[in-house]
Structures are given as C-alpha cells and as structure tokens.
C-alpha cells in the first residue's frame, strides 16, 4: 500500500440501493486501515471526462449507509472510448475516443488507483482505461443481478423486495375485480428479478427472457384457472420477455448511450393480446424506476459493506484490475476483463425454475 497515496471512487450506470454503503465502506477502510486520501468522481466516468473530482472525507461517508441512490451521482452515457462530443448535420451523434482526456485528468488529480462501482457497462469502461495503465478495482452493482462470476449483486434483493411488495398489492385488487393482472419488472435480457419477485409473491405466471413464451399457453392457463373457480391470475413479466420466434418490445432508442436500446412495455402488449383472445378483463402495471429507489434492505447493506471492504483489501494487497464477487458463499475476486461486455442469464437448470414449476407456476412454454 506504500505505492498508493490517493484513490478515487466513482459510481457508474443506473443507480440502485446500496451504492452509498459501498462508498462508506471504501472511504472509512481507506482512511482508518490504510491512511489513504480518498476523492470522489462526480457522475461516474463523466466526472473523469469533465474533471469533476473532489475530496471524500469521513464526514462525507457518515450517515449514508441507509440512503438510496449515490452521493456521487452517476451517468450511463459516458463511455470514454465512445463519448458524444456533438451532432452531425442530420442531428445524429458524433462520437470520439476521449480516453486521453480521462488519463490526463487522473494524472492531474494524482490518483494512484480507482474503485469503480457499477454493472457491466461500468466494468467495460474500466477495462478501457486499465488497458491504458490505470489501476482499478471493480465492485459489482445492478438490480438486474446479471454480472458474470458473481452469484449476487447488491441492490438486487432490495429491488426484489420492492417488486414483491407491489405484486402483493396487485394481488388484492386482482382478486377483488377478478382480473388478469400483469406486473412488469426491469432486468434487461436477464430474468432474475422477475423470477425471484414472482416466486416470492406467489405469481401464477412468470415470463423471463431466457424462456420465450407461447401466447396460447399463457391464455389457456388463464382460462384454465377461471374454469377451476380461480377468478384472477397474476403474471410477473420481465421487460426482456419475448414470444417464441418474436422480438423484445423496445420502449425507446437513445443513440448517444453505450446501451441505446431501452426495453419496456411488453406487459401492455401482452395485456391487450390476452384480453382479446380470452375475453378476460386484463390490466398491466410497469414498475419502472421505482425498483431502483429507496433504502437498501439489510442484506444489501451488509453485502455492500463487505464488497467495499474487499475492494480495499485488493488494493492493499496490490491485486489491481479485479472485480469483487460473491461466489459460492465467499467474497473473492475475478479479473475485470472477464466481466466486461458480458451478461449472466438465468440458466435453464436453475433450481428455482424447477421449484416454481413443481408448484404449478406457468413459465409460458408449457
């Protein structure tokens, strides 16, 4: 650790509960255990591009364990290797590689290493500057739970709890009005959030991206429940779910984002289709960004604290360019290069899939 004197911390990508808990653990461990100076980078990699860097003190890291969001701010439009610098004559984005600007700002700030807290996009950006000689440690964050090599990411359990509470409330109104009710969760191309929230809330149908659904199977299941005297059906659907042979529903395209395709609206499409085919009254609710907000549950506070502490242990041991992971019950690490540009999807042999099928839940394909 004698080679390190000042480290930077940034949070990138979408926000989620537990980010401040990691920041707190990193700052306090760095100061108390290693005597390091810590600075915060505003709005993720955008702060490195625009040179918005400021000190992070013990006072800054106090009383933030339970706060949602991130005190540093974040951005999901700031990949240094492909950064929007203007627009062409037709209004399209003009991109440039501004990595040299980032390196100059890191050098000017005297940063010996960076702690990058984020998902696959953040780790991809980190890998870009690692290749140019910057020492980094990654901390996995996403409510989607889709980072490679880690069994769980902080923020996921809070998002599951939020979605589960919404589904519980939908359950009572579905029962009262005898409706088919769809609740759409986030998750992009991974179904972890829908699967766990659906299982925890007792959903009758769970639709995830990894298992393309057959609309006839879903409709027949809803009609079958009605025929057995069950006058309502709860469907949990991931935003990335799609029919067999079909495509995902795209909500919008953001050209200047590293991840331009934004999914959303599949529940509304399905609600119309189910209503038309079955004659059953059907409604859809899209949970959206409410899943990202609020105070982290106890599990995520503890996991985030352990991740932040482990990040500092990696720096202290000279183990650079690695991401902290939770694997087989242990907090360990893997090279960031093995995480960048990848997604961890729900395996078709996952035990929870077998469990929900065994209790009669329809997964859309049988």
Image (spheres, grey):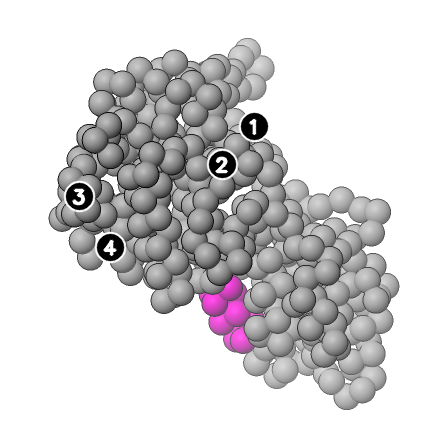
| Mark 4 → mark 1, Cα distance in angstroms | 34 Å
Counting from the top left corner in percent of width and height, residue 73 is at 32, 41
| Mark 3 → mark 4, Cα distance in angstroms | 17 Å
Mark 4 touches mark 1? (CB < 8 Å): no
* Residue in the foreground of this view, choosing between 269 and 240: 240
Q: Residue at x 77, y 88 (%)?
A: 229
Q: Residues within 10 Å of mark 1 (few under 14, many from 20)?
A: few
Q: Which residue is mark 2?
A: 335
Counting from the top left corner in percent of width and height, residue 74 is at 37, 39
Q: Which numbered disc covers residue 64?
A: 4
Q: Which of disc 4 and disc 2 is earlier in sequence?
A: 4
31 vs 125: above or below: below
266 vs 11: above or below: below
Q: Nearer the viewer, mark 4 or mark 1?
A: 4
Q: Residues within 10 Å of mark 2 (few under 14, many from 20)?
A: some
| Mark 3 → mark 2, Cα distance in angstroms | 25 Å
Residues shaded magenta: 160-170
State the image quarter where residue 52 is shown.
top left
Mark 3 touches mark 2? (CB < 8 Å): no
User: Does residue 180 show up magenta in the picture?
Assistant: no
Q: Which of disc 4 and disc 3 is earlier in sequence?
A: 3
Q: Which of disc 2 and disc 3 is earlier in sequence?
A: 3
| 91 relative to 49 in the view: left or right | right
Q: Residues within 10 Å of mark 4 (few under 14, many from 20)?
A: some
């Amino acid at each position: 650790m004698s080679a390190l004197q000042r480290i930077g911390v940034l949070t990138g990508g979408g926000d989620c509960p537990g980010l401040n808990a990691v920041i707190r653990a990193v700052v306090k461990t760095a100061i108390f255990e290693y005597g390091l100076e810590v600075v915060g980078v505003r709005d993720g990699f955008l702060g490195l591009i625009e040179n918005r860097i400021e000190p992070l003190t013990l006072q800054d890291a106090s009383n933030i364990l339970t706060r949602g969001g991130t005190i540093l701010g974040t951005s999901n439009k700031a990949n240094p290797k492909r950064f929007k610098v203007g627009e062409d004559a037709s209004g399209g984005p003009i991109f440039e590689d501004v990595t040299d600007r980032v390196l100059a700002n890191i050098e000017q700030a005297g940063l010996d290493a960076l702690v990058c807290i984020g998902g696959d996009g953040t780790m991809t950006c980190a890998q870009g500057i690692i290749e140019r000689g910057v020492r980094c440690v990654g901390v996995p964050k996403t409510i989607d739970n889709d980072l490679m090599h880690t069994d769980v990411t902080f923020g996921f359990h809070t998002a599951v709890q939020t979605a589960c509470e919404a589904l519980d409330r939908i359950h009572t109104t579905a029962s009262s009005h005898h409706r088919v009710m769809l609740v759409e969760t986030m998750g992009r191309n991974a179904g972890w959030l829908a699967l766990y929230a659906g299982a925890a809330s007792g959903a009758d149908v769970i639709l995830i991206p990894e298992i393309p659904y057959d609309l006839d199977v879903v409709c027949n299941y809803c009609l079958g429940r009605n025929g057995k005297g069950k006058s309502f059906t709860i469907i949990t659907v991931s935003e990335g779910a799609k029919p067999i042979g079909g495509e995902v529903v795209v909500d919008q395209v953001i050209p200047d984002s590293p991840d331009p395709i934004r999914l959303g609206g599949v529940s509304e499409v399905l609600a119309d289709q189910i209503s038309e085919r079955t004659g059953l009254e059907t409604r859809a609710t899209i949970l959206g960004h409410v899943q990202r907000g609020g105070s982290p549950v106890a599990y995520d506070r503890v996991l985030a604290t352990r991740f932040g502490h482990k990040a500092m242990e990696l720096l202290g041991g000279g183990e650079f360019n690695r991401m902290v992971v939770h694997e087989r019950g242990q907090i360990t690490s893997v090279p960031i290069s093995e995480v960048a540009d990848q997604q961890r999807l729900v395996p078709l042999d996952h035990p929870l899939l077998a469990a929900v099928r065994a209790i009669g839940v329809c997964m859309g394909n049988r």
